[in-house]
Image (cartoon, helix red, strand yellow):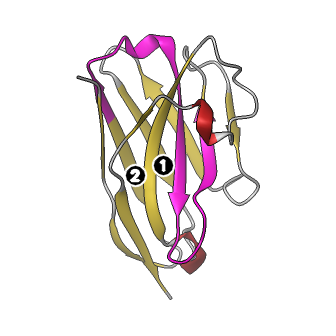
Amino acid sequence: QVQLVESGGGLVQAGGSLRLSCAASGLTFGNYHISWFRQAPGKEREFVAVINWSGSSTAYAESAKGRFTISRDNAKNTVSLQMDSLKPDDTAVYYCAAKHFTETFHAAGRQSAYYYWGQGTQVTVSS
């Protein structure tokens, strides 16, 4: 059974930092590109960042560029999202998702391409 489990969310003041983690099991982790998405109250889920199967390529939404960093450790089956300079607009439930490496790394925002999703972790940024 494939599981993606997010952790690391919480309440932080604007300007602060959080580090989210996504732990995977039940799949050959190194065969999957991993993305982070987020969904704010009343809004559609949106792409945040992606890292390719080997960790050699990353891409970010404009809202995340320069503030968020995605990384992975294939030996530990984990992906992290370091979030710095957080803003109230970053408040959302954050999800990690996996798509097979045979899917294009590009078009990372196409949610239908992702095979597996986690349950999400809440991030709240206070002003």
Task: Indicate the position of residue 11 as horizontal and vertical percent values.
Answer: 34, 74
Q: Circle 1 — which element?
A: strand
Give the magenta part as a residue range.
23-50
Task: Indicate the position of residue 95 as horizontal and vertical percent values.
Answer: 44, 49
Count numbered badges in the picture: 2
**107 or 68: nearer the eye?**
107
Work out which quarter of the rendered image holds the N terminus and state it: top left
Q: Circle 2 — which element?
A: strand
- The label number, if any, that marks residue 82 in the structure image: 1
Residue at screen point 56% across, 20% down: 55
Contact flag, marks 1 and 2 (Cβ < 8 Å) = yes
Residue lying at the far bottom of the rendered structure: 127
- The label number, if any, that marks residue 19 in the structure image: 2
Can you tell which quarter of the image residue 102 is in?
Answer: top right
Task: Indicate the position of residue 96 as horizontal and vertical percent values.
Answer: 44, 42
Q: CA distance from mark 1 to mark 2?
A: 4 Å
Magenta run includes residue 24: yes
Residue at screen point 63% across, 49% down: 47
Can you tell which quarter of the image residue 59 is in?
Answer: top right
Q: Dot 1, how many residues are within 10 Å of its Cα: few (below 14), some (14-19), or many (20+)?
A: some
